Image (cartoon, helix red, strand yellow):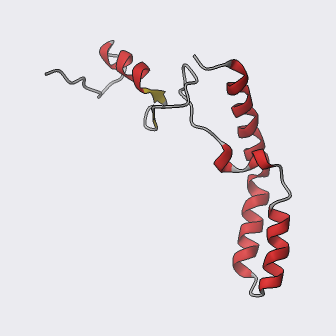
């Protein structure tokens, strides 16, 4: 189980990212359309003005159940050991466990 403070921090970042998403997209579209380099630099400065934690690259994909930040499967949203436990308990349809 991940520390609660780290999970809360990631949730706060998700909220900020959603808040500033449209602003970032509009500025990026402006950058593509403006032909002059000097104008592009001014738009880049505006793009840096939102909070740093609102950038989508600051988000961390975490396990849905435990909050573990590493070893996650995108398809399921679970970390590896939780995924294995659920497959062995037949809780995930279509997933087969390997045995050799």
| Residue 84 coordinates in the image, percent (x, y) | 35, 20
Q: Nearer the viewer, residue 95 or 55?
A: 55
Question: Could you say which quadrant of the image residue 71 lies in?
Answer: top left
In this view, the residue farthest toward the top is: 89
Q: Residue at x 76, y 82 (%)?
A: 34
Measuring from the top left, give residue 81's x and y in whole percent. 40, 20
Q: How many marks?
A: 0
Q: Residue at x 25, y 25 (%)?
A: 96
Q: Position of residue 86 (x, y in %)?
A: 38, 17
The quadrant where residue 100 appears: top left
Q: Is residue 20 left or right of residue 61?
A: right
The percent position of residue 76, horizontal first and vertical second, equals: 44, 31
- On screen, residue 85 above or below 43: above
**Viewer-side residue, 23 vs 51:** 51
Q: Considering only vertical position in the picture, is 2 above or below 89?
A: below
Could you tell whether 28 is left or right of 71 in the image? right
Q: Residue at x 65, y 41 (%)?
A: 59
Q: Which residue shows up at 55% across the image and 19% down it?
A: 66
Q: Residue farthest to the left?
A: 100
Image quarter hosting the N terminus:
top right
């Amino acid at each position: 189980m991940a520390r609660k403070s780290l999970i809360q921090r990631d949730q706060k970042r998700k909220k900020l990212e959603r808040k500033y998403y449209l602003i970032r997209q509009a500025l990026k579209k402006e950058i593509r359309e403006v032909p002059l380099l000097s104008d592009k630099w001014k738009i880049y400065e505006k793009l840096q003005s939102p909070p740093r934690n609102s950038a989508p690259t600051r988000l961390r994909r975490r396990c849905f159940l435990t909050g573990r930040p590493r070893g996650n499967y995108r398809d399921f949203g679970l970390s590896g050991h939780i995924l294995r436990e659920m497959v062995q308990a037949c809780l995930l349809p279509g997933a087969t466990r390997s045995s050799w």
